Each structure stands twice: as C-alpha cells, then as structure tokens.
Amino acid sequence: GSWATTTIDSDGDAGEYTSIKLDTSGKVYISYYDVANGDLKYATNASGSWVTATVDSDGDVGKYASLALNTSGKAHISYYDSTNADLKHATNASEAWVTTTVDSDGDVGLTSSLALDASGNAHISYYDDTNADLKYATNASGAWATTTVDTNEDVGWDASIALDTSDKAHIAYYDNTNYDLKYATNISGTWTTTTVDSAGDVGEYSSIAVDDSGAAHVSYYD
C-alpha cells in the first residue's frame, strides 16, 4: 500500500538504462548497464531473493537496454555495443545467455526498444547514428533482418516499440530535425510514418503502448 525501495546491486556504479518486466506470478526481471565495468547486467527475484548476473562483458556493452519476457518467463534484451557501435541482442531462452550482433552497419543501436510477438520473436526499433535514420530489426523469419523505417532528415531518436494483437509494429520516435513527435507502423504491410505532434519542440523520451483495439497511446516530453 506504500512505496518500498530495495537496493538490488551495489557492486560499484551499476544501474543505468534500466528496463523492467514482471512475469505472470509478479516476479521481477531487470536489465541494466554496469557503468563501472561497461557490462550488460540482469537481476531477478524469481527464486525468492535477488540474484544478479553479468550477461555481456565483451567490451563496453549494455547502454539503452530494453527487456521483454516470453511466455516461459525467459528474457530477451536489446542493447548498444559502444565498443563496436553495434546493436546486440541477448536471451536466456536456452537457459544459458546467448548474445548476438543484430546490426553492425555503421553506428547503430542507440535508444533501442524491444517487444516480443506471440511466437516469442523479437522486434526492435533503434536509431542509426551514421545515417540519422529510424531502423527496425526482427528475427521473425528465423534470421535477423533489418529495415530502415524513416530516412526523412534526422529521425529516430528515443524510439519506443509496441506490437498489436496481430503482431504488427507501432513505433513512436523523435524527429531530431523538426523537433516533432512521429509515429510509424507496418499494419498495412509496408511502413508508413506520421507526424503526431509538431507544436513546438515535442517528442523526446517517448513511450508507446497499443490497446486491444489496436489504438496507439504515446507519452512524451514537451
């Protein structure tokens, strides 16, 4: 009934870029960046007490982490590899953590956001810093495929992705050139983009959710 706070990891400077999900039993799963060691870390209280693990320590990795759980309570995490300027994905679906480089075409993977479809496939929105574009990646076909969604000037920062009940993607993001909130979706089979709000400098730090009717709801900074 009242707020309670718990220190989960106090081993050095750890806890930036947190992302949290709950399983059907209300257990907590968190991905986060270990600043002191430049690692991607993960914590859960699924066993009854908090347990932390280092997921990826290959270089400076773990910024912009985004976590989702599959129906079995296994985690999928998208994150930025700062050393190689790549988008990476990690999962413990096979019990042991497996990490994969998803996109290494230039400096890609900043401000990633991850959602899982009904089959447990990953869908990731992220910023391509080399080309200043919004990009999207998915392994729904069995292999990772990447798509440039919006190339209109400098767009794609602070992207947030959600899937509807038909597993179509909806992405809210910031137009860095015009300072607008934008929205992209592939519900028609091809990507379409729309400017949602252009009243001043709006759209940073967006977060999107889709209701059961397929309507998008976006919170963002003005």
Image (cartoon, helix red, strand yellow):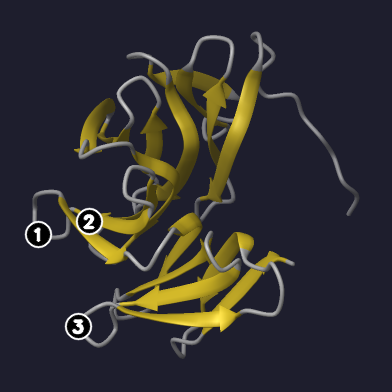
Residue sitting at 49 percent across and 60 percent down? 160
- Using the image, determine if residue 200 lies above or below residue 58: below
Residue sitting at 40 percent across and 46 percent down? 73
Tell me the number on the disc at residue 138.
2
For mark 1, what is the residue? 141
| Mark 1 nearby-residue class (10 Å; few <14, some 14–19, many ≥20) | few
Q: Secondary structure at mark 3?
A: loop
Asked if residue 137 lies left or right of residue 144, the reply is: right
Kindly identify the amino acid type of the residue bearing the numbered disc 3. Answer: Gly
Give the percent coordinates (x, y) of residue 152. 37, 68
Q: Secondary structure at mark 1?
A: loop
**Is the Cβ of the residue at disc 2 closer than 8 Å to that at disc 1?**
yes
Write down the quadrant of residue 118 in the picture. bottom left
For mark 3, what is the residue? 189
Give the percent coordinates (x, y) of residue 199. 70, 80
Kindly identify the amino acid type of the residue bearing the numbered disc 2. Answer: Thr
Of the 4 image quadrants, the one containing the N terminus is: bottom right
Residue at the far left in the pictured view: 142
